[in-house]
Image (spheres, rainbow, N blue to C red):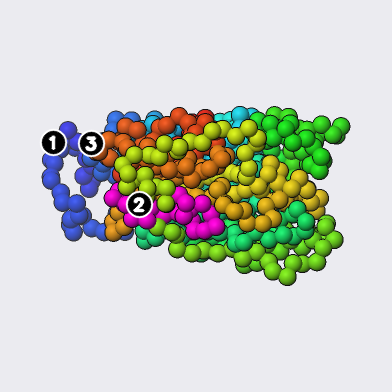
Amino acid sequence: MAVRRDHGGQVSTGPVLYQKLALWDPSLGSEEEEETETLELVIPNSWSPQDSLRRKVDRLPGAWARLVAALLLLAVGLSLAARQLHARGDPTGSPGSGVAPPSGHSHTPGVYHRGATISPAGQCREVLGKGRWGGGLAADPPHPTPSLPVAAMCSHLGRELLAAGGNVVDAGVGAALCLAVVHPHATGLGATFWGLFHNGTSGRSTALTSGPARTLAPGLGLPSALQTLRLLHTHFGRLPWPRLLTGPSTLAQEGFLVDTALAGALAAQGTEGLCPLLCHSDGTPLGPGARATNPSLAAVLHRAALAPTPDLAGEALLRPLLRDLGLQAPSVGPTPSLEPALQLAVPQGVLSTTRSPSAGPELLAMLQAALHSGRPPPDLCLPLPQTPVTPVGSVLATIDSSGSVLLLISSLNSSFGSGHLSPSTGVLLSDLVAAPAASAWACPLVLHSSLDDTDADVLGLVASGAPDVARVTTRALLGHLAGPQNQAQHWQHQGPTQNTSICGQGILLQVAAHAEHAHVSSIPSGCCTFQGF
């Protein structure tokens, strides 16, 4: 029943007649003609809490009713969205773990949908998220970050650069500069760099070299790291160059905790020439967990960030270094270069590595002989040396799911290089002052399973710390190729080869792109940390 008033003001009652209306009927008039009409949202499968809210506001005057109803419905929608996000969990995942993507499936540790970075790490742990960190990406991480091994900061930085829209070159260069801060015993701005970049889009591989080793002074190598990394980024990087240096310079300025790798090297080396950077006030070496800062290095990185060319990036270090040593500028500076990788076609695809004077040619010859004979050479692993292995180096790798790979290896030759610390720059110079007879420490390798198909599987291997990394890399690749004939099944269940040692020492990083996923691992498994998304 409905209640009406006629023109005379009399009240009458009668049945309610319903008429099916179109979404818009000209007979209803325009919106202006019915200014007092209350508009309602037509929602299929209406939800009862909304009906309840609407009934409450029906009693309010028209304009206020519409406003309150809109605000209440907005609050309900936001609450639902928050619940849904909470149910999905944190999309960034935890360090070194498989990440559950929006599709709902998860992966084993070291497998990611987009990309990942892997680099060496010690066992000392520090909490990220304090101070300005993240390569200039944000003042603080958006979510609390679990405690990470100190050098895992470098893998974390690489991951953040990837997540910010950078590519594997951005991530690799940023991580390399980070390692130059936290692992001065193995790498740094005084180190020599080799690299191998495989472009997953074009299928082309490019070798990076620092150029011939040159002498700055007796026993001191001419630094070339900044020029080399800046050249690589100029040709293949995506993010602005200064963004790559913000994280490392902040880390040098605000400090980092000494990990077990650096502490062990300090204990073995002693502190002569390394104070005050790596010493307590009484001259004793810093131990695991001690905080070290390097504001002079932070200043160098800040100046290098403003350099528009590779040569000017190198000047940010070279000028104050020459003042410290009282030297004139060398007549010939560093000559880093990019050139097509050395390649070898094999039944399993195409192998790419660095050219001479690296150990790349030796590596390809060894692999060709082993694949031709059908069995590995009997002396693939050499006896362990009785003296410390040189050169001492550092490796890292970055990869994305499209098959782009960057492998970087660097060395100061000896532990802490020359042992000469430049006070104005905070940099340790290399003692690699002449090209060795065989650059056994540099032979990164990429296997692309098809030269014509850019979507084919890609495998990257890079090793350091062994007396002959060419043999180590050969053994690792042969182990991978000896997997099941069904390579898809091999990748699904095992990923890269899972050997537990590489001739008893050193480390090997393995990265791969398969089935639109990025895979990262290391041998031994606990030596390195990886971060991906």
**Secondary element type, mark 1:** loop
Q: Nearer the viewer, mark 3 or mark 2?
A: 2
Q: Which residue is depicted at the point 40% across and 32% down?
A: 498
Q: Which residue is mark 2?
A: 448
What segment is highlighted magenta in the picture?
A: 344-363
How far apart are labels 3 and 1 at the CA level?
Answer: 28 Å
Quarter holding the C terminus?
top left
**Secondary element type, mark 2:** strand
Q: Which residue is depicted at the point 19% across and 51% down?
A: 23
User: x, y percentage for residue 81?
Assistant: 39, 37
Q: N-terminal of the two: label 3 or label 1?
A: 1
Type of residue at label 1? Pro
| Front-lying residue, 438 or 217 | 438
Disc 2 vs disc 1: Cβ atoms closer than 8 Å? no
| Front-lying residue, 461 or 13 | 461
User: x, y percentage for residue 245?
Assistant: 63, 53
Q: Does 338 sit above or below residue 137?
A: below
Q: Which residue is mark 3?
A: 45
How far apart are labels 2 and 1 at the CA level?
Answer: 80 Å
Dividing the picture into quarters, in which one does residue 340 lie? Answer: bottom left
